[in-house]
Image: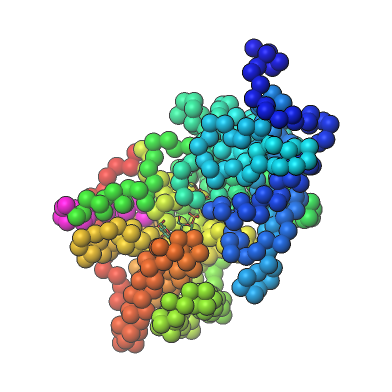
Amino acid sequence: MSDTSRPRAVTSPVPAASAVGFGPLVAATLPLLRDWLPRQRWFAGKGHPITAITPVATTLLPGPTGLARGTGVLLHLLLRVDQHNASGGAPLNDIYQLLLGAHPDGLPGIGSDTAVIGRITSGPYDGLVTYDAAYDPALTRRLLALLSSPQRLGPLRFSTLGDRPPAPAAGRVGTAEQSNTSIIYDAGGPTDAAILKLFRRVSPGLNPDLELSLALGRAGSSRIPTPVAWFEAELPDAPDEAPATLGLLQHYMRAAEDGWELALRQIAMLDADPSRVGHFAAESFLLGRATADVHLALARSLPVAVLRRAEIEEMAEAMALRLDAAVLAVPQLAPHRSALRQIFRDLSASARDGLRLRVQRVHGDLHLGQALRSTRGWVLLDFEGEPAKTLEERRKPQPAVRDVAAMLRSFDYAAAHAVMAEPSVAAAWAARNREAFCAGYAATGAPDPTLDPVLLRAFETDKAVYEVVYEARHRPDWVSIPLTACARLAASVTELTESANGSVAPPLSHPTTPTIPREA
Ligand SMILES: Nc1ncnc2c1ncn2[C@@H]1O[C@H](COP(=O)(O)OP(=O)(O)O)[C@@H](O)[C@H]1O
Ligand SMILES: O=P(O)(O)O[C@H]1O[C@H](CO)[C@@H](O[C@H]2O[C@H](CO)[C@@H](O)[C@H](O)[C@H]2O)[C@H](O)[C@H]1O
């Protein structure tokens, strides 16, 4: 069927793109974005009034751009969003990535209300509906096509790895709760299936998710999904800086399940059968081993250093400052402030007693949802680090124990999130899995994280404090989970400090090694 014989979906006359260009389309969309952006999970500036939205780069992604033919337009936008800082700090001016779709009929066949930005009501594009084109399979197919060979398109630069370009496919947005947006292309065979993570808040410089995936790929690690391609842009405001990473295409592990879902399923069975309390421990042991494998590969591939007394004291002080900022943001934390500060002082005291810390590149935001159990074992995802931190902070070498502590928090989260008839069974489940994870970690020859409980507890506290703020901002119903953890950590202070004053702090008890299943 020729284009002219297609049934026309157009109800209002729309101009030929060549006649007016897409500037007016973008300009007419900007006011609609003021309401729409703060409703997106990935928008980092929630709660701060938007003062301006300015396009910093607009690129038409090639394809059958035919508004009049009902095929839709796909624009790649980088938008600078200026915001008044409602907390009194410096104004915010972040850059966000948006795939802007426009269609006379809205978003046909896509069941996502949040994707619709709004209808334009004046000017040359009057009547068009604009939307987040990540949700439009026909349009995201164009982005995948661009990722199949190295090329440039305006400010966008596409790079590929390996010799097998992704097969053409329509995309769908993943359903996982996430800080960015992932588009899954899995209509073809399992080896072709790919997932494209579109980074939403972008800044100049290599995103650690891309950087570490490439480093681990080069190191031959099987602990990550194979990277396939990526794209980036030189930001016009920062011509001298490294390009901003915009998206990473990886092999999609279709049959894999994430650790959070697996853990919740296990916990759900405990009510009926509390004797299953140790059933997940073998998996946690393997997950500990996978985490250590990643750490060992990163330490071989990227720079490492050793922190001495002054630097460790500085690190402990930074933790205390983050705690103070968190207390201001979430006053329920205030009753625990002084005990939690003691935890960081204990770390400084260890530094004065001669503690030395090896630092290296780490995951930076490890939790059960970032681990996939595939037929070939556990793989880790999302090496982006904590979304609220600057790229520079996230790319700094850190003690590997930071990831261990974060995963220990995740076992606690899973246990606390599950509604259990008998909370002590959930607590026992968390304890068993935390211990098994550490045992698996140490079984690789990597340093046993339980041997320095002062260090581990400081990192766990730092993470729990971060989580209090994260939950208060994003999921207020969940804030009691990290708050309870902070209360527990605070309560442990006297006990551990007294014991440490006696001689050495008590190590966590080691599990009896669980039966280890085959990973692949
Ligand atoms: N390679 C992959 N294979 C299968 N599922 C994946 C893959 N990468 C990501 N996912 C799924 O997408 C979710 C979000 O990915 P993630 O990288 O954590 O995004 P974000 O940084 O936006 O939170 C993951 O929790 C996982 O369920
Ligand atoms: O996955 P992201 O990189 O976006 O990380 C952020 O969101 C996480 C939640 O999705 C959040 O993790 C917290 O909740 C998890 C359960 O949903 C839990 O397993 C983690 O232990 C807990 O920290 C993460 O902190 C945040 O940065």
Examine the rendered structure and indicate whether residue 325 appears above or below residue 145: below
Given residues 159 and 82, the one toward you in this image is 82
Q: Nearer the viewer, residue 192 or 154?
A: 154
Image quarter hosting the C terminus:
top left
The x and y percentages for residue 247 are 61, 44
Quarter containing ligand 2? bottom left
Q: Give the colour scheme shown.
A: rainbow
Q: Is residue 243 visible?
A: no
**Quadrant hosting residue 390:** bottom right
For image coordinates 82% across by 30% down, the residue present is 18
Q: Residue 496 placed where, x, y %?
A: 33, 81
Give, as a single range, the part of the protein colored magenta.
Answer: 272-289
Residue drawn at point x = 20 percent, y = 62 percent? 422
Tell me where residue 387 appears, x and y as whole percent. 56, 59
* Picture residue at 39% right of the left edge, 36% below the top: 255
Give residue 216's position: percent from left, percent from top: 53, 47
Q: Horizontally, is 439 left or right of 214 in the view?
A: left
For the point 59% across and 39% down, which residue is it?
A: 134
State left or right for residue 482 relative to residue 118: left
Quadrant in which the N terminus is drawn: top right
Is any atom of residue 127 visible in this view?
A: yes
Q: Report how many numbered discs are placed on residues in the image.
A: 0
Within the image, what quadrant is residue 321 found in? Answer: bottom right
Question: In the image, is residue 210 part of the stretch drawn in magenta?
Answer: no
Q: Is residue 405 above or below residue 99?
A: below
Report the side of 112 relative to 256 (left or right). right
Q: Kindly report the secondary structure that dominates the magenta region of the rendered protein.
A: helix
In front of the other: 195 or 313: 195
